[in-house]
Image (cartoon, coloured by chain):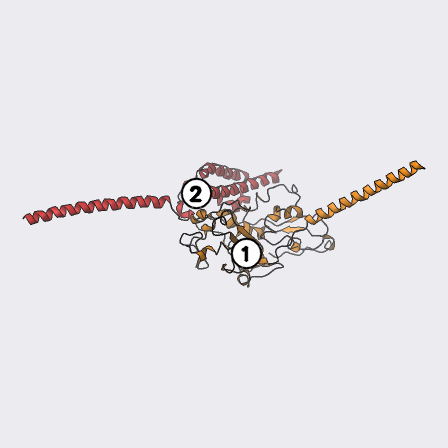
Amino acid sequence: MPLQTGTTLSAAFMSKAEIIAILLFIGLAGLCGVRAIGESNLPAAQAAPAQEAWQKEFDQVCSKTQDAMTFSPKELTVLIQRCDALLPQIEKLDDTRKKVYMGRLRMCRGLYAYVLDSKRNEKK
Amino acid sequence: MCSIRKEMKRNECGLLLLVLACGVLSLGNIASAQIYLPAAPPEQPSEYGKVILDCYSSTGGPGAVVFDHWLHRSKFTCRLCHVDIGFAMQAKATGITADTNRKGFHCGACHDGKKSFDGKIIFASCSDAANGEQCTRCHSLGRKDVRKYEYKSYTEKFPKGIYGVDWQAAERAGVIQPADFLEGLSVKKARLQSREDFSVKAHYSWVSDITFSHKKHSVWNGCEVCHPDIFPTTKKGTIRYSMYLNIQGRYCGACHGKVAFPLNNCQSCHPLGPAWATQNRPTPARSE
């Protein structure tokens, strides 16, 4: 019986140690995980989830540059306005992404403005 | 008598001054005329379009990077790198660092050790796991026999023009198929609706007018590489294009004379010879 009690106590102690070990493991894993996310070296496209709203809008707006000449002045004006609305969101990105996407947005907006200007000149 | 001599002397002095002024003026004209002649490209076409990237590399780093346009343009369009990836067309304006490469920007957009091209994995740039040999594939300035690709063997089967590879012919013949899309970075676009070709009038009688092909240029550049940054005007006749401005790196000279065929390859733009010699000749159809 005492042996039995001893076994029960020992079993209870082991389970506590196991729980502490598991908690410690989870804690450490959590910390490492946070660090891994913070210092991510994933490619830009993976590091920045495609679901980000600004990126979706950017893709939609700037996917139309090939067809710029087919748009009416009204449509081009809307596209330019959408580009302008994206600017403050892109300005919030980290330095490298900001530089890359600001450049792309500038080119994209510039092209729409250029085509709009040429259409206005055609009318004159 | 004395006054006549004095006047003669004065006239001689005036004549001398006039001759001197004419001499200075004609020397000045010769000098300025020489400016309008495009410089010859490097003797070796392999050197043409070579870019040395050295913002930080040679100061305590692994040495300057040698970037060969001929290698990369055989695989990718100009637009992909200069628009989607964000490589500026001016020196030291991109801000490439080992860190930006590791994060998947700039060189690291393709050189990430995961993406593949032609069935081969593209080596990772500035990877922590890289050994010295891998670093010198790019950081190769002043090093011999460290580059994997050599111009001569790499371009052996490419059609050649007056100066090096005829990239347009290579693209037309399907020898190269430059990629214009990079997964995760490029935006899916509809096929480009090519604009009509147009003519640019030559200012001089000894060259023919230029027939500018939008189709040929848009294969490599899309629209936004050229407009509005390089060609900003939308009103015909507002800019007087000239060889002088081209040589200064503006307009056509933003690419031609640096990477695209050299500016002294006159016939590629002025294909018909002098205007006076072609006045009664029908314009031949240009091959696309």
Across and down, in percent, residue B187 comes to 47, 47
Disc 1 to disc 2, C-alpha distance: 32 Å
Secondary structure beneath label 1: helix
Quadrant including the C terminus of chain B: bottom right
Q: Is mark 1 in CB contact (under 8 Å) with mark 2?
A: no
Label 2: how many Cα within 10 Å (few below 14, some 14–19, many 20+): some
Of the numbered discs in the image, which one, if any, rests on residue A55? 2
Question: For numbered disc 2, what is the local secondary structure?
Answer: helix
- Residue B218: percent from the left, percent from the top? 56, 50
Q: Quadrant of the N terminus of chain B?
A: top right
The residue most toward the right is B1
Query: Residue B214: where, in percent of width, then height?
Result: 59, 50
- Residue A48 is left or right of residue B153, and the answer is left
Chain of the residue displaying label 2: A
Circle 1 residue? B70
Q: Nearer the viewer, mark 1 or mark 2?
A: 1
Please name the residue shown 53% across and 63% down the image.
B153
The color chain A is rendered in: red
Q: Colour of chain B?
A: orange
- Residue A43: x and y in percent read 41, 49
Amino acid under label 1? Trp
A74 on left or right of B7: left
Residue B167 visible in the snapshot: no
**Which one is in front, B263 or B48?**
B48
Three-letter amino acid code at disc 2?
Gln
Which chain does tag 1 point to?
Answer: B
